[in-house]
């Protein structure tokens, strides 16, 4: 039953925060960080096992809820706990000079966000997915508006409205599924989804696509993203592109693989992803605000992951997992670096990179950007290469072409940024970065380079994850217990 | 005998809907306190 700890512990710490804060000012922060260390240790412990399905928890089957920790969900659980831990370690130093007001509430939200993103990945019950979908959403809305400036509140409202619309579509889909099939368990639904009448199937698929489409930031449902990134603080942005989007992407494709194993729907999703990527990169070209620019870059990368997942092919999914890994880490580096820059120079304008005086941050950001671009020897390359290779093998050349064009557009604005960073010009006063933060940045950059140079460190595991994610039959067998 | 699942489902959905609505209203109130505006067309702090 220990995989339930991944959800229960952060929730417990979230609710216990008011009590923990009685033990001095640092009680909450330190206890949360220690809890995240423990979760990471637990996840790494699970990684050493050899079973594809690590743990299955069914409470009062077939009506009760169930959680499945497979190799695929374990990858995301490990990624999320690691990202949250890195974030907390960075924040431990950041708070000394620029703490959030009312940190107790802030940590309740962070713990809720972690618990519900992990819950999204683990649960195998569509109504549970809805509940975690909403909890993740609500914590994200509050984190967006946390600073209570007009722009933060406006972004929060915008995010809340789009999220509320998305949840209406999702709940309609769930109701239709329950009326027609009589179960909420993903495995049971998967068994009889094929036998539904064609119109019902199409209606449910479209409702699910729109409901999740808002959250996985796919065109044309992603117009809120850049505003939310601009309005919220750059610390929180790191969580949005490092954790939240990845959780929604995983759960969406988990459902797609179970309900619609193949067919024209997946071809549609491939084209949708490719077009989203192209549009995001075109929109990114003319941005002058760093947060907006990286928001569009996130949209592009997420759309690439979306395309790769939609191909329903082990190599492509392995590529998608590689990109998800590299993108989470690189965006974590970039948004945390932006936080440091903004703290010192009070600006998010693109010109600030010219005056930034810190060769450490320049190097670290360069590594992250090169990995995002997919330059060889960095982690992003392996993923992009696998995706492009399987697109070429499958013969979907139009999509291959679109993705290459989009990547070139991305390269245009990233190299513009790199040019700004290394331009000789008047530099402002030195940007000091604390040793702990330097260690955090170095660890993240090291992981990007390590996976880039030696992909075999994780490629076997990712291959296994991709296989198990695509293998809906064994998922159903495990859960229904044929 | 009634099936309990739809009841549980709809109740949960209502509770979540209420929570989101309350949160949204509280954002709107905070926004009004800061800027004195309630018209959506006049919310322009993100457009620059």
Image (tube, coloured by chain):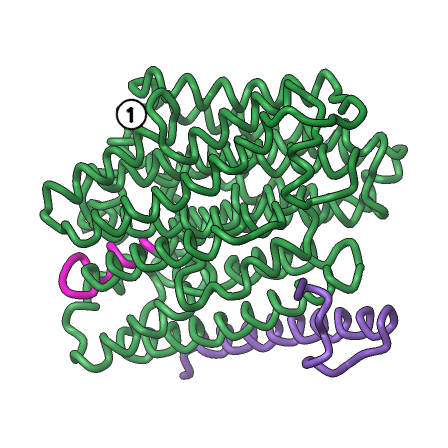
Chain colours: A green, B purple
Report whether residue A59 is seen: no
Quadrant position of the C terminus of chain B in the picture: bottom right
Q: Above or below — where is A110 with respect to A269?
A: above
Judging depth in this view, the residue of A156 and A407 nearest the camera is: A407
Q: Is residue A230 left or right of residue A417?
A: right
Task: Magenta stretch: give its range.
Answer: A253-265
> What is the x, y in percent for residue A420?
58, 33
> Dividing the picture into quarters, in which one does residue A321 lie?
top left
Q: Above or below — where is B47 with respect to B40?
A: above
Residue visible at 20% across and 65% down in the picture:
A265
> Dividing the picture into quarters, in which one does residue A349 lie?
top right
Judging depth in this view, the residue of A442 and A274 nearest the camera is: A274
Judging depth in this view, the residue of A94 and A470 nearest the camera is: A94
Residue visible at 47% across and 63% down in the picture:
A222
Can you identify the residue that label 1 sits on?
A: A459
Crowding at mark 1 (Cα within 10 Å: few <14, some 14-19, many 20+): some
Is A368 colored magenta in this rendering? no
The secondary structure that dominates the magenta segment is helix
Q: Callout 1: helix, strand or loop?
A: helix
> What is the x, y in percent for residue A393?
10, 41
Residue visible at 68% across and 57% down in the picture:
A231
Q: Determine the chain carrying the residue at label 1.
A: A
Judging depth in this view, the residue of A466 and A90 nearest the camera is: A90
């Amino acid at each position: 039953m220990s995989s339930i700890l991944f959800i229960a512990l952060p929730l417990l710490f979230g609710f216990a925060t008011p009590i923990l804060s009685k033990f001095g000012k640092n009680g909450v922060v330190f206890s949360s960080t220690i809890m995240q260390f423990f979760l990471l240790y637990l996840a790494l412990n699970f990684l050493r096992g050899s079973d594809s399905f690590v743990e299955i928890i069914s409470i009062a089957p077939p009506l009760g809820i169930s959680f499945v920790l497979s190799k695929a969900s374990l990858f995301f659980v490990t990624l999320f706990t690691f990202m949250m831990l890195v974030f907390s370690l960075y924040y431990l130093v950041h708070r000394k000079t620029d703490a959030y007001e009312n940190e107790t509430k802030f940590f309740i939200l962070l713990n809720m966000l972690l618990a519900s993103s992990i819950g999204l990945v683990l649960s195998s019950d569509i109504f549970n997915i809805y509940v975690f979908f909403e909890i993740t959403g609500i914590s994200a809305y509050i984190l967006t508006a946390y600073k209570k400036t007009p722009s933060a509140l406006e972004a929060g409202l915008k995010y809340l409205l789009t999220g509320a619309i998305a949840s209406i579509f999702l709940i309609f889909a769930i109701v239709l599924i329950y009326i027609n099939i009589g179960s909420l368990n993903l495995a049971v639904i998967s068994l009889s989804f094929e036998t539904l009448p064609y119109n019902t199937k199409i209606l449910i698929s479209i409702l699910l696509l729109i409901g999740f489409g808002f959250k996985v930031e796919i065109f044309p449902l992603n117009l809120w993203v850049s505003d939310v990134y601009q309005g919220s603080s750059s610390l929180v942005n790191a969580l949005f592109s490092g954790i939240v989007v990845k959780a929604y992407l995983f759960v969406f494709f988990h459902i797609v693989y179970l309900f619609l194993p193949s067919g024209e729907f997946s071809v549609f999703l491939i084209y949708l992803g490719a077009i989203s990527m192209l549009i995001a990169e075109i929109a990114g070209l003319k941005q002058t605000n760093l947060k907006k620019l990286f928001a569009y870059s996130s949209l592009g990368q997420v759309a690439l992951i979306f395309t790769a997942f939609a191909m329903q092919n082990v190599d492509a999914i392995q590529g998608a997992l590689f990109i998800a890994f590299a993108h989470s880490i690189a965006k974590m580096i970039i948004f945390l670096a932006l936080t440091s820059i903004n703290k010192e120079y009070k600006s998010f304008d693109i010109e600030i990179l010219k005056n930034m005086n810190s060769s450490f941050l320049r190097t670290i950001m360069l590594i992250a950007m090169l990995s995002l671009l997919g330059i060889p020897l960095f982690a992003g390359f392996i993923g992009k290469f696998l995706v492009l290779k399987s697109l070429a093998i499958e013969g979907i050349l139009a999509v291959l072409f679109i993705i290459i064009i989009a990547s070139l557009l991305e390269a245009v604005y990233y190299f513009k940024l790199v040019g700004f960073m290394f331009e000789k010009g008047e530099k402002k006063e030195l940007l000091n970065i604390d040793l702990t933060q330097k260690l955090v940045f170095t660890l993240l950059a090291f992981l990007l380079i390590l996976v880039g140079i030696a992909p075999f460190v994780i490629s076997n595991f990712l291959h296994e994850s991709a296989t198990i994610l695509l293998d809906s039959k064994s998922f159903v067998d495990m859960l229904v217990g044929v | 005998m009634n099936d309990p699942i739809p009841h549980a489902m709809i109740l949960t959905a209502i509770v979540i809907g209420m929570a989101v609505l309350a949160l949204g209203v509280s954002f709107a109130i905070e926004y009004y306190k800061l800027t004195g505006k309630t018209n959506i067309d006049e919310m322009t702090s993100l457009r620059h």
